[in-house]
Amino acid sequence: MVCDVCVPRAKGYSVYFPDAHSMTLLLDYLKESSADEYKLVDNTTVWLLEPVFFSFVDYAAVHLGEYGIEAVEAEVFNPAKNENNKKPIHLFAKERETAWIDELISENRIITHYQPIVRIEENIPTIYGHEFLSRGLNKDESIIPPYKLFEAARVRNRVFSLDRACRLQSVRNAGIVKDKLIFINFIPTAIYVPEHCLASTFALIKELEVEPSQVVFEVVETDEVQNIDHLKSILSYYRKHGFKYALDDVGTGYNHVDKLELLDPDVVKLAIDYVNGVSKDKQKQEVALAVLQRSHAIGALALAEGVEHIDDYHFLKDMGYDLFQGYLFAKPLAVPMTDLELQGSMLQKS
């Protein structure tokens, strides 16, 4: 069973009029609407399905001057629940502008790009795995960048369903990289109860016969986590079922090196802020070394993410970093890279 949080359903709004007379203006407007698109709550309040509400906002702006009308998102079966949060109807512009994200999720217009994660063996770069990075598709098949997807999802309160949709699409594409590790991002605040919220992901992994040991779930946006015990319960649930997990952006904000022992990840990603320019910056070098030492102390692999410059790569490689990722090797690609021979010649010290 899929809950309403996982898959977006149509929203609705309770609309509040200043008096009963102004309400009659709306009733005239609703004559062409079907019975399931609105519900009269009382003589100054009506619940409207979202498309009808947005259309009414346009009508009100032209014909009523908005007339002191306010609204709030609400469920049809409990239209008064959020009454204290109501606001003038002209302030719903962002909700309207980002409504496209609901349709994108429902139609699964999500694709995956792949960025190789590199390991150096006898001075030869080899592909250790791939990070699966989600992109959206417009109806004309142009690509929507991930930041725009999640900006819209936050406005619409769809982060949970978008995170799930991206996760499932990544799993569907797992077979394309064969035996390499698969790094799949997930937002911990989008998972309420692991047993429920991850059920569809685990079921699809089983159905497609993907080995759990091949999958690395990568924790992103941990700065939003308020309950560290909840995060630990999610990570423990992954490990209990044979999956690995990685911690992203270590060294910045919430992901301080002191958290490593507490969360016990399999892979630790040094934040990009401490990778770019590390070969020439003492402070970045100190953080990079601290992350490396703590990672190895708990038995985790240390990964330098966002490597763009050859000098930074050599510095971190000589320091002892295990894995590398970044534009120096490859940008995210629509088809996974399989050969790093050219990059190998470029990485040799002069």
Image: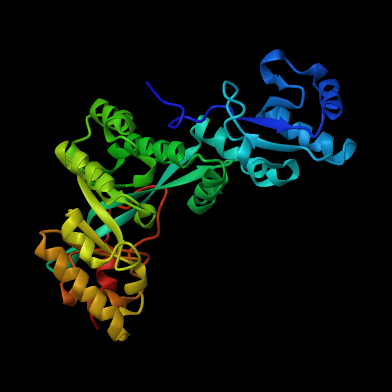
- In the picture, measured across the screen, residue 7 lies left or right of residue 281, that is right
Task: Identify the residue shown where x is 86% and y is 21%.
Answer: 28
- In the picture, measured across the screen, residue 61 lies left or right of residue 92, that is right
- Look at the image and tell me whether residue 206 can be seen: yes
**The C terminus: image quadrant:** bottom left
**Residue 334 x, y percent position in the rendering:** 42, 48
Q: Quick one: 79 or 221, which is closer to the camera? A: 79
Q: Is residue 347 above or below residue 331?
A: below
- Look at the image and tell me whether residue 139 can be seen: no
Q: Quick one: 187 or 30, which is closer to the camera? A: 30
Q: Quick one: 318 or 329, which is closer to the camera? A: 318
**Residue 67 x, y percent position in the rendering:** 84, 39
- In the picture, measured across the screen, residue 96 lies left or right of residue 169, that is right
**Residue 252 x, y percent position in the rendering:** 34, 67
Q: Is residue 192 above or below residue 278?
A: above
**Residue 122 x, y percent position in the rendering:** 12, 67
- In the picture, measured across the screen, residue 240 lies left or right of residue 255, that is left
